[in-house]
Amino acid sequence: MAYYYRNKSTLDYQERKLLEAKKKREEELEALCVVGYASKLFRDDSTAMEIHRGGYLVPWMWDTTLMIDR
């Protein structure tokens, strides 16, 4: 009976791809920069309802099915 010993330093194709994808995700997360600004909150029920309905959304690239908040 022949035994096959796999060298631990040799990874198969699928394992290499998984490691490369994990490394790429980690690099992308490291490049993420989040900026926040201070704001004041006001109690205005009519404006809050209009925002909730989507009244202040604008179409993205003139496509009315994709609305964004500016």
Image (tube, grey):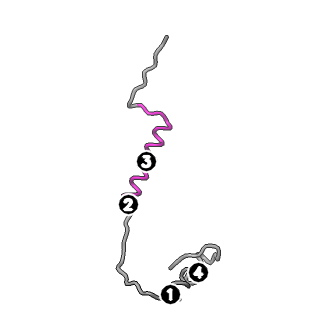
The image's mark for residue 22 is: 3
Residue for point 45% across, 39% down: 16
Sequence-earlier tag: 2 or 3: 3
Q: Main secondary structure of the magenta part?
A: helix
Given the image, on which type of amino acid does mark 1 rest? Asp
Q: CA distance from mark 2 to mark 1?
A: 39 Å
The magenta region covers 10-30
The image's mark for residue 45 is: 1
Residue for point 46% across, 19% down: 4
Q: CA distance from mark 2 to mark 4?
A: 35 Å
Is 51 or 28 nearer to us in this picture?
A: 51
| Residue 19 locus on image (x, y percent) | 43, 43
Answer left or right for 30 relative to 12: left
Given the image, on which type of amino acid does mark 4 rest? Arg
| Residue 26 locus on image (x, y percent) | 39, 52
Answer left or right for 62 relative to 7: right
Instruction: Indicate the secondary structure of the residue bearing disc 3.
Output: helix
Q: CA distance from mark 3 to mark 1?
A: 46 Å
